[in-house]
Image: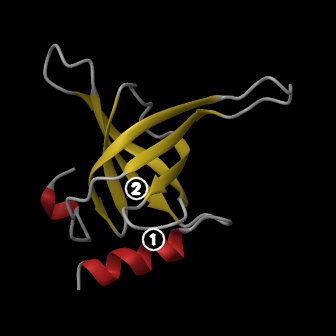
Amino acid sequence: MADEQRRHLRLPVASRVFIELVAPGLAEDDTGEIATCRTLDVSRGGLRVSLDHELTVGAILQIGVEWPGAEDTLYLAGEVKWCRELPAGQHRWSAGFKLLNANNSDIASWIRLLSAMDS
């Protein structure tokens, strides 16, 4: 995403992130599929991650962020806005998420946390 399209300051915060790629099924032994990755930067409205999986642009995914120094994981919903393979040989991807104002998410806590950091 071009810098002129960004509405919020990006901060270089590294934290562990869990992305639900496939939701668990109804069967007791069906745990779904979770990707573990790292943030490259964050803002009030989104985040950029580095991961081992290609993501589908436009997908709405559940995201858990382990914020440095926080006791609880923040649970968010985000739309994949872009996904690019990193330079050859790394077998890694970088993806950008737009965070959504979803019910039962921690978006209000996320916005308060990031607003305090970029003030």
Q: Is residue 2 left or right of residue 26?
A: left
Picture residue at 16% right of the left edge, 53% below the top: 2
Give the quadrant of the C terminus.
bottom left
Number of other residues with Cα within 10 Å of mark 2, as a class: few under 14, some 14 to 19, many 20 or more:
some
Q: Secondary structure at mark 1?
A: helix
> Where in the figure is residue 99, as x and y percent of width and height?
45, 59
Where 73 falls versus 33 (above or below)?
below
Where 9 falls versus 97 (above or below)?
below
In the displayed image of the protein, which residue is found farthest to the top?
89
User: In this figure, which residue is indicated by the disc labeled 2?
Assistant: 98
Give the tally of numbered discs.
2
The label nearer to you, 2 versus 1, is 1
Whole-Å distance between the Cαs marked 2 and 1?
A: 13 Å
Picture residue at 27% right of the left edge, 78% below the top: 117
Number of other residues with Cα within 10 Å of mark 1, as a class: few under 14, some 14 to 19, many 20 or more:
many
Specify how the rendered protein is coloured: secondary structure
User: In this figure, which residue is indicated by the disc labeled 1?
Assistant: 110
